[in-house]
Image (spheres, rainbow, N blue to C red):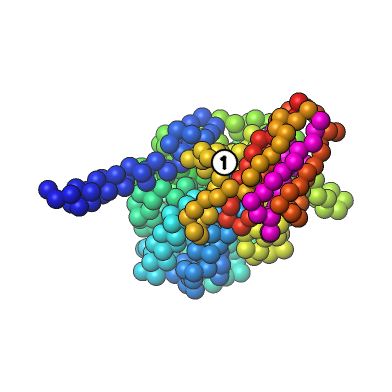
């Protein structure tokens, strides 16, 4: 066999091995990639244009958005692949789901290609409470679907299973989110006040089908922890509750992803300040904050109060045992904020724990995602260790470079623009120990450990 053919064969054989190593799996209450822990920090990018997929999908926009999240230090995002069901999915008046349009699948094919290209993990939300809301034309079809076993079967067979099988070999399909904030379909008359047992049956059927056909993880974007914890109204999505409605062992969620807005924090605690998954009794599996405002962690008391700034909320959540944080939203679909509001928090976390964002991280440098190359910012730092608390920093460049110092737990001490190639600072008022100095510029990040004796 000729040499070039041998090389080609090696490449073809090796490619699936390299790709499969990127799949996210679960062990206990941790996410793993190739046996190493990963924290799923990123964003919600629910849509660019409402009902993108099968509608007004723009490939270049999604490519650019994934690049922005990656450059800001994120590794994942959550996307609503159907916003209210009026575009892309095919459903009859009696609630029977017959499939999806060719445009829907074509757009998703492109989006997942871009996700893999940019190494952004996708949590794909299949539907939302919006499907059942009486403000759009076809809401009754979706209510008919979820209240009838045969129609739920049509949803599973003609939408869930084809979706799962189509993308299960893409390692950047991190998880399938069955439904966005499905609890409102029970709580709100405008969405049908549909009984809990019907919602649980639906979630159980979808979870079981995904598990029957793949190793893709399954979750549910719960509207509030009070419906996801036996400490309050009850964990409506526990293994026991789901299995009671559909008696299969794989009818379960692989991880929990409750949402935390100011009203939730007010009544049920602050995930980045004083509440761990164990406090809610859900630490038997990984727990991710599926949504919270991009501008920070608020408490809606007498008036909304910022309790944890966006720059600190990723590290705060991690220190409380949460395995990821996905603010709403990267692209500012409403007044809750944009990536600009929380990118400093993503970068602070990545500076402190680069190996938890990219388990393949080994060098202390992050490659430029646009040019696929690395470079150093720090020419020298001395003395290190420091007895006096003073450090002198010498850079290879300083324009548009941001310097940031955190403690060993990742809490921010300072963040400022570099003004010269040489700078100095003193931290003699801080406790002795290890600190992390990072230098960042769009697409690049380098971190160094500083020791104060």
Determine whether, in the image, residue 92 is placed left or right of residue 363. left
* Highlighted range, magenta: 388-413
Q: Nearer the viewer, residue 102 or 229?
A: 102
Q: Is residue 209 magenta?
A: no
Q: Nearer the viewer, residue 279 or 98?
A: 279
| Residue 214, image x, y percentages | 36, 44
Determine whether, in the image, residue 397 is placed left or right of residue 132. right
Disc 1 packing (10 Å; few <14; some 14–19; many ≥20): some
Name the residue rendered at 78%, 44% in the picture: 424
Seen as rendered, the residue at the extreme right is: 302
**Quarter placement of the C terminus:** top right
Q: Secondary structure at mark 1?
A: loop
Which image quadrant for residue 65? bottom right
Q: Which residue is mark 1?
A: 364
Name the residue rendered at 76%, 38% in the picture: 391
| Residue 91, image x, y percentages | 42, 65
Q: Nearer the viewer, residue 399 or 144?
A: 399
Determine whether, in the image, residue 53 is placed left or right of residue 165. right
Q: Can residue 409 be seen?
A: no
Q: Can residue 2 be seen?
A: yes
Q: Is residue 401 magenta?
A: yes
Name the residue rendered at 75%, 41% in the picture: 392
Which image quadrant for residue 180? bottom right
């Amino acid at each position: 066999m000729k040499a070039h053919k041998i090389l080609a064969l090696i490449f073809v054989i090796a490619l699936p091995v390299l790709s499969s190593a990127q799949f996210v799996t679960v062990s206990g209450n941790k996410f793993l990639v190739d046996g190493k822990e990963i924290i799923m920090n990123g964003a919600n990018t629910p849509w660019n244009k409402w009902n993108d997929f099968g509608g007004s999908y723009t490939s270049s926009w999604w490519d650019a958005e994934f690049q922005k999240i990656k450059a800001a230090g994120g590794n994942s995002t959550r996307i609503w692949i159907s916003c209210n069901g009026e575009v892309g999915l095919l459903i009859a008046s009696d609630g029977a789901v017959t499939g999806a349009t060719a445009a829907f699948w074509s757009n998703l094919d492109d989006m997942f290609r871009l996700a893999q290209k940019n190494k952004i993990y996708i949590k794909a939300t299949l539907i939302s409470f919006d499907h059942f809301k009486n403000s759009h034309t076809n809401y009754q079809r979706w209510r008919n679907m979820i209240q009838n076993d045969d129609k739920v079967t049509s949803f599973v067979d003609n939408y869930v299973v084809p979706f799962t099988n189509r993308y299960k070999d893409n390692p950047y399909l991190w998880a399938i989110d069955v439904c966005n904030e499905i609890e409102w379909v029970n709580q709100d008359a405008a969405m049908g006040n549909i009984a809990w047992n019907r919602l649980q049956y639906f979630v159980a059927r979808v979870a079981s089908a995904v598990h029957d056909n793949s190793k893709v993880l399954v979750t549910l974007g719960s509207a509030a922890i009070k419906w996801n914890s036996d400490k309050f109204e009850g964990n409506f999505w526990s293994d026991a509750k789901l299995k009671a409605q559909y008696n299969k062992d794989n009818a379960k969620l692989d991880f929990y992803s409750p949402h935390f807005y100011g009203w939730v924090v007010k009544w049920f605690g602050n995930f980045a300040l004083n509440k761990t998954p164990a406090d809610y009794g859900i630490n038997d599996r990984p727990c991710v904050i599926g949504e919270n405002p991009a501008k920070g962690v608020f408490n809606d008391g007498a008036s909304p109060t910022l309790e944890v700034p966006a720059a600190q909320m990723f590290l705060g959540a991690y220190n409380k045992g949460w395995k990821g944080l996905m603010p709403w939203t990267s692209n500012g679909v409403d007044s809750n904020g944009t990536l600009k509001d929380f990118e400093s928090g993503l970068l602070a976390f990545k500076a402190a724990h680069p190996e938890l964002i990219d388990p393949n991280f080994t060098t202390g440098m992050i490659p430029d995602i646009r040019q696929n190359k690395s470079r150093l910012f720090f020419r020298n730092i001395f003395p290190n260790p420091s007895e006096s608390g003073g450090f002198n920093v010498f850079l290879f460049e300083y324009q548009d470079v941001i310097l940031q110092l955190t403690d060993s737990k990742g809490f921010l001490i300072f963040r400022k623009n570099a003004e010269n190639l040489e700078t100095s600072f003193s931290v003699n008022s801080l406790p002795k120990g290890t600190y992390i100095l990072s230098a960042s510029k769009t697409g690049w990040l380098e971190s160094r450990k500083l020791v104060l004796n």
